[in-house]
Image: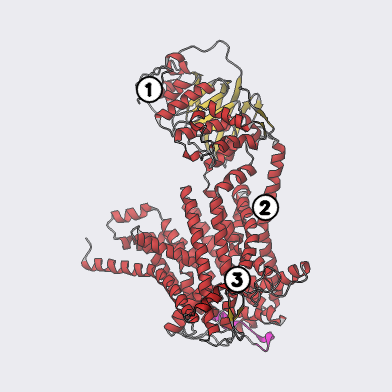
Amino acid sequence: MNEVSDQPRRERNVPPIPAMQVPASRRQTSEPHPPEPVLRTENLTIQYGRFAAVKNVTMEVSARRVTAIIGPSGCGKSTLLRAMNRMNDFVTGASVEGRLFYCGEDIYRAGFDPVELRLRIGMVFQKPNPFPKSIFKNVAWGPAINGFRGSIEELVEQALRQAALWDEVKDKLHDSAYALSGGQQQRLCIARAIAMQPDVLLMDEPCSALDPIATARIEDLIDQLKSQYTVVLVTHNMQQAARVSDRTAFMYMGELIEVGDTAVIFTMPGEQRTQDYITGRFG
Amino acid sequence: MLSTLGRFKERTIHAALFLSAAVSVATTAGIIWVLVYESAFFFRCDWSLLTEFLTGTEWTPLYAPPHFGVLPLICGTFLIAGGALLMALPIGLATAVFLSEYAPSSVRSVLKPLLEILAGIPTVVYGYFALTFVTPLVLQPLFPNTEVFNAASAALVVGVMIIPTISSLCDDALRAVPRSLREAAYALSATKLEVSTRIVLPAALSGVMAAVLLGLARATGETMAVAIAAGMTPKMTLNPFVSVQTLTGYMVQVSQGDTPAGSIAYQSIFAVGLTLFTITLAINLIAHRVLRGFREAYE
Amino acid sequence: MSVAPGIFVPRLQRRRRIGTAVATMCALLSLIGVLFLGVLLVRIGKEGWESLTPTFLTNFPSVLNPEQAGIKSALWGTLWLTLVTVVVSLPVGVAAAVYLEEFARPGRLRWFIHINISNLAGVPSIVYGILGLAMFVRWLHLGRSVLAGGLTLALLVLPVVIIASREALAGVPKSIRLAAYALGATRWQTVWSHVLPAALPGIMTGVILALSRAIGEAAPLLILGALTYVAFVPSGPMDAFTALPLQIYDWIDRPQPEFHRLAAAGIILLLGILLPMNAVAIGVRAWHQRKKAW
């Protein structure tokens, strides 16, 4: 698994199999005072019909950190992610037990408005899905619908700058979004989500449909975004989790096996299954 | 290994199947041939008759001298087809939106078959309903000057007739819009209505347009309901409350009546048929073009 | 959080309320069609019910005596026509579909035939009448017979049969064909023994829908010159005929209200044949789709 290394800013270790190395910048121990959790699950179980995709998961997501959820295919990580902004409401037959708190409020309680939740928790999907509109309208659509009062051009520019896309599109804002490359489209989707000024950004395998160069750019982007947003990242790419995240949760068959600081998880995992997954024994 | 007899049998079967498929090509060829050939008889290489046909505004084949301007028939056809579309488009689209975005599956499983039943009712029944119910009990109380035979009642029932067509095609178009677009919109804190009307519907627009065109083609070709309800007096008018005649209505009138076969009035049926065929063919071809473009965008 | 160049006023309550209002409006509009259907059936039922007597079914139509008139000739005429239609359109339609789906190589020829069928499906039925008039009545000298009428209707519904059969054939999983080929079957043997039986429900649905369309058509038969006053039952395919929709049309055309009641009775009979047919077709399709979901 060689990676294109044209990134001068940060040292990258190409992880050989089976031993895993964590980049030097990440090898710090956890901070003495972890910040207040923004998202917290408590015995969360999500079932599709009779199949339990997420079983009894209790974990926390800290503010302004990147939390990665890793695990083999089908382990429930996407389901868990989608539960956080109630996107699994759209799956027929999905039922949720347990609780999920956002800033202390149980978002699955009766009467809670999911549309309002999504104002604060944005999402970027696996395959870039820009609207069949212009680049400008893609970014401006969400704020316009939600009653943005102010300069929308500035908002669009700010979002595109934060998504590291402004310089590439500033001259063609009114061209169709479909004229962009895959990586650019995904950055556009990130800009679109950021334009809503969310607290939390949920990213569901955002790089899995992209080539390595585009992937590297988005990983850099995630690193920058963390200063303003809380990021929860689902990825099947362990090395990506090691590179980018501060905390990592490992899931297997719907259960949360282990969660902790990234450096710890990847060097001294507590559970045998985590160790097996990381060293490539399965998955 | 296949024996010679077996191979022969296989070949003959292949040929028989091909011939069956070729029947459709023969049908198209036959239709075009008959219409063009007999229309040629009608026009008898008379350019002035052709010009009058295409541009004249009087259609009086049985008068002396007869006038053969087809525009009043076309006007009647489109008055009714247009009126039908005016009614069927909002209802069909609303039905499609309701069925695909809002209705629970229990409602859907009842409503969809009901619409199919609506589509299966023969047109004579609609004509009867227009004449005996719509005109006397709906139109005449509301608009007292409505004649017994009028375009509005025909337009109304033809509209109901094409609602299932438009609704099912729009439903297909809405469903073709990928889920990922809807998810993206929901994730941006949009309500269901906003997702349906501001993302899904615009994305499905060319599919909806194709639905409109196909509905229009169907309404144009509609015969019995129109013949019963709309009357037999060709006019150039936009007034829906008077009797008009359509291309199809005229063809029915001639074949029913005492017009002597072989006379020029009788031959006019073919010229009118050719006009009708050309119009519906053109609309159908455009519609399929639009539909193919729409499908390619989402494959 | 960075400083935003503005603020959000989401007004979710208001947007939600508008959404509900529009959804309700869409629901009401969808019900208009159903409402129309209901009113139509109730009114026709009321107007025609009394005239629907056993003598109605066994008498011939009478211009002078509406009370004595019956629909026997039209009923038998429709039955005869349907017989001819199905005998012609079923084999030809299924054979054409088999050719297009199983035998033809993808290319210009197949595309051309496909385009033809799509266009034919959109041609108004009255034009088929003209074709029938020229081809069957005159050129083949079949006269105004059941055969001419049945052939015309068969051509009319052929595209329906072909399109439905093609869909049914395309829905058969490829694995069935591959398994048969692997056992050494020829293409035709595969189709005949394995693919066609699997596609049968879909084909049946298509044929039933096609027939119900043919039964309800009057325009092409009028162009053929079918008589509307016929006081006998056809005894062979070369006999003259009338049909249910034609008789109904004839009665509607008369100004006297007694004939309108007869027309209503005829419509009840016609719908009594067509609605169950459509229901069976829809039912077969639903059953088959549920089975396939396995």
Q: Which mark is residue C215?
A: none
Query: Is residue B213 in view?
Result: yes
**Residue A6: where, in percent of width, then height?**
39, 22
- Magenta region: which residues? C63-78
Question: Is residue A118 rendered to the left or right of residue A28?
Answer: right
What residue does disc 3 label? Answer: B123
Q: Residue at x 69, y 85 (%)?
A: C67
- As measured in the structure, the alpha-carbon distance from the residue carrying label 1 to the one carrying label 3 is 72 Å
Image quadrant in which you'd find residue B143: bottom right
**Residue C207: where, in percent of width, then height?**
48, 67
* Pointer 1 and pointer 3 on the same chain: no
The three-letter amino acid code for the residue at tag 2 is: Ala
What residue does disc 2 label? Answer: C27
Image quadrant in which you'd find residue C226: bottom right
What residue does disc 1 label? Answer: A5
Q: Residue furthest front?
A: B48
Query: What chain letter is assigned to the residue under label 1?
Result: A
